[in-house]
Image (cartoon, rainbow, N blue to C red):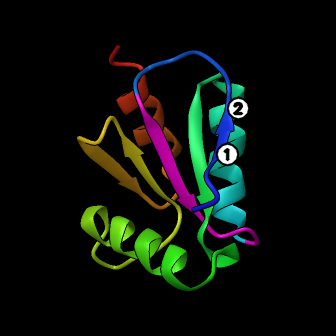
Amino acid sequence: MDVKHVEGENKGKIMLYAISTCVWCKKTKKLLNSLNLDYYYVDVDLLDGKDREKAEKEVEKWNPLVSFPTLVIKDKESVKGYDEEEIRSKLSDE
């Protein structure tokens, strides 16, 4: 799976499942960048075959609707969709 890494402040594993053309996904990436956070992301729509199936299954564990963006924080909790307040809140508890 083609997972990209953005370096920044490490607040535990942050994984973003996104769609490359999605406005809300782009806003989520922009927010994470503005917070200077270390995170990983994958643009699910750019994956093929088994990689895409695997990514969609991972998203489904955190977001049964398999909607994007889905942000997984420390393999413990997730934020579904773009919710700046919730993202800031969950990532500032550290």
Residue 19 is situated, as x and y percent measured from the top left of the image, at 65, 70
How far apart are labels 2 and 1 at the CA level? Answer: 6 Å
Q: Choose top left, top right, bottom left or bottom right for residue 12.
A: top left
Q: Choose top left, top right, bottom left or bottom right for residue 8.
A: top right
**Residue 16 sits inside the magenta stretch:** yes
The outermost residue toward the right is 21
Residue 46 is situated, as x and y percent measured from the top left of the image, at 70, 74
Amino acid tagged 1: Lys
What secondary structure is found at the residue carrying circle 2? helix
As drawn, 9 above or below 17: above
Residue corresponding to mark 2? 33
| Left or right relative to 91: residue 24 | right
Marker disc for residue 61: none
* Residue at the image point whose x is 59% and y is 71% from the top: 44
Residue stretch in magenta: 13-21
Residue corresponding to mark 1? 29
Picture quarter with the N terminus: bottom right
What secondary structure is found at the residue carrying circle 1? helix
